[in-house]
Amino acid sequence: VTAVSVCLLLLVGVPLGTLFSAAFEQGAGDAWSAVSGDGSGRALLNTVWTSFAVSALAVAGGTTAAFITERSRAPGRRWMRGAMLAALFSAPLVSAVGWTRAYGRGGLLDEATGVSWDGLFGPGGVVVVGVCGAVPLAYAVVAASLASRVEPDTERAARASGATPAQALRTVTLPLARPGVAAAAALVFVSAVNAFEVPAVLGIPAGFPTMTTRLYQNLTLSADPAAFTSAVALAAALVVLSVLVVGPADALTGVGSAPRTAATSGSATTDARSSWWLAAGLWGFVALAFAVPLVALVLMALTRAIGLPPVPANWTLDNFALAFNQHAYAALRNSLLLAGVAATVVLLLGVLTAVLGRRGAGRPLGTLVTLTFAVSGSALAVAILLAYGGRLRDTLTIILVAYLAKFWALGHHPVAGALERVPDDLVRAARVNGASPLVAARSVVAPILGPALAAGWLLVFLFAIHELTISSLLYGPGNETLAVVILNQQQLGDVAATSALSVLLSLLIAFGAALLVMARRAARTLGAAR
Amino acid sequence: MVGWVAAQVALLLSACAGASSGAATGGSGGSSGTTVLLYTSYSQPEVDGLVGAYRAAHPEAKVEIFRAPTGQLNARVAAEKRGGKVRGDVLLLSDPLSMQQYAAQGMLRRWSPAEASFVPPEARSDTFWGVAFLDVVVVNQPGLTPLSWQDLTGPRYRDAVALPDPGFAGSAFGALGFFAQAPGYGVDYYKRLKSNGAVQVQSPTEVITGVAEKRFKAGMTLDFLARAAIAKGSPLQMSAPAPGAVRLYAPVAVFGDTSRPTAAEAFAGFLLTEPAQQALAEQRRHPIRADVPAKTPALKEVAPDWPLIFQRRGELLADYRAVFGG
């Protein structure tokens, strides 16, 4: 316990402590006026209202999608789950840039039909693209709770007792799904508060600040010392805002995760015709929110010059050749190194926390780890800069430290889940049959844990590879990550390079996600064979 | 078990720390004094061209590059200064006005390059030296060429002009310096642009993108960027409206805080040599040296009175912000 606690203290406790003491150094009144004053006050307000809007819409959308894949007769539900999972891993930066290329002025839609959405830059775009990114997240949480917690048997009982499908849905399924929906809402709200990429691409040009973009601009675009003070106060406010929401939510979701008794899929509550409509709706969402922007990016990356129609006659690979210069490669190497090391260390920490949790001492630790995930990347970056910036400023190590703090929870949960699935009986049976502890560990625990560990590793790796919020604040000469290079090209207005690099990042993520799916499948097969 | 894992974590961390500090400061430790850290607002192809030429002449030398728009560089330097000292050795900017701010704060080293005599008098000071000229021009949709900069405030360009942000792009700051003191213009020119619906974007590159995609009819940008886009086939025209394209010079300087003054001066001085000037010409820049010909046709230019503009430096951005906001 001590080792884990010390790690947690060093990674999160000390930096946050430094952050708050710095924020309150000039007295609470001044810190508050820095947050509420002038531009920052507007940013705070924008963050709060856009986060509420994004949460409400995304939870509604995600819940609907979850019911479509888990409770309807819509065709191709397996593919839908796959598509939503893929969407979950897409980089928000790529999405935001893709939307501008797809629906903005001079974008794909504009090129094809002369129609474009001018409100894309501004609050409208920040909310809509934010919702699109958050729907898969809400979906994943609600679908998981529908699959594990909501008993198909109770639904069938209701139907057998004469309830209409709609009644069964209203009186049985929805109430049982409520904790899942609440958890999704909390998670989406926190990630909306902490979102940086979408408001950076769509909000900054329109003069629509949020707390994270304001913080970014204060740190990277202002030479004024007062801007740094205000950034510190903003970071502290962000922490308070996220923890206020997640604390209660984590307690809420911890309640009763009863194992399901029947392994059958849920009862269908729709007829065939409406199922088709539901399927069409879900595929429409995936196409409009993710596929079209990605296609627009690829076309832009292939087009010879800006302002030319993206037809084959104008295609070239020059943009890729130009974008993948030695600096992009160096950045790619940094990203891979950071993500790889972060994933490995996070997994080790996850195993530690989980092992302790199994002994009963780690439950509060697990909650703490979850809380750190709620802390905004921007705030964490500022906190770690304050605490360790003296020695580590501009090194990859400082980014790594922030990644470890941020992604600990991501590694903790899959490992904890997998460890729970290792039945004590099996280990005992192996030991009774003469296996040494080592053999028991190798032949019983490792096969069950291995794929889960691989999946956990890939999960952290995937999130770290497109991480931008932290790296955009902590990078220095020679330490850019790939996402930082993309953001800088985007801020510079170099559309071709931005698109080409975004396509590369997407390919990288797709490759990692494919591996993740394979690891998950292996884990499930092993689980079933048991 | 716990101890073992902790040890592994420590090992990984230290390995990573070693790798990163190696990458970040590679060889800064005394003996190999040939590494310099360059802070620049130049775009990537030009920096690569310059560094390539330097490495060809000095294969043992190493140049680390931190490239960012001027506004971002200013923020970084300011943060480093607050933390103790500036890490960069050489500063290469796109306009003299931003550079003058550092000179005025005494942050630049007094030095004189070996080839100083090739730098025209108007692009010299005791701390920074012009490396290339660049022109602030208008880029416009075909057939919409303005005859004068004043035309952009007229009804023909209503709601259709893009301007780069002087707080972000050094060249835009330089142009602001020129217009602020030009007869018939002044900060009032920006007020008229604003009331005609002109839009502030971030960078000169963004202006070109916006005009090429027909979001704007015209915009203020840099000649070599416009030429590059036109050469690739973007549907654009470049023009130098009366009184002319605003000629800036892009200066190089050495930070006073540098711990490797010899290497820093060697690199900065190299930028004035013929191979470096040739490399700039390859990237459609106008060499500062008269004996290295430019590869692009000359435009009608106006040359700002820099000493006069330097005096007004402090109030310029604030005046501009009062018009176009922050």
Image (spheres, rainbow, N blue to C red):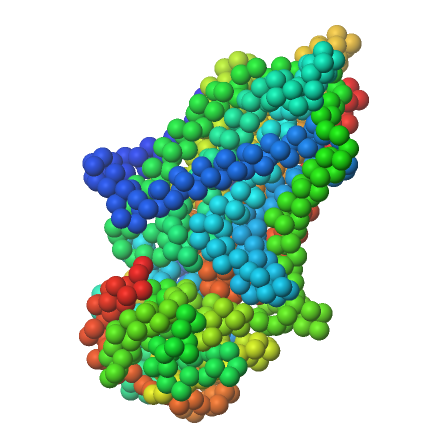
For residue B268, which quarter of the picture? bottom left
Which quarter of the picture shows residue A24?
Answer: top left
Count numbered badges in the picture: 0
Q: Nearer the viewer, residue A515 or B260?
A: A515
Q: Quadrant of the N terminus of chain B?
A: top right
- Is residue A70 toward the left or the right of residue A181 in the image? right
Which of the 4 quarters of the picture holds residue A519?
top right
Q: Residue furthest right?
A: A529
Residue at the spot 31% in from the left edge and 54% down from the top edge = B79
The picture places residue B186, in percent across and down from the top left corner, at 25, 77
In this image, B162 relative to A340: left or right?
A: left
Q: Position of residue B111 (x, y in %)?
A: 29, 75
Residue A320 placed where, x, y %? 63, 65
Residue A73 coordinates in the image, percent (x, y): 75, 31
Q: Going 57% across and 32% down the picture, which residue do you hit?
A: A411
In depth, the one of B322 and B48 nearer the eye is B322
Front-most of B208 and A448?
A: B208
In the displayed structure, A131 sits above or below A305; it is: above
Q: Is residue A380 left or right of residue B5?
A: left
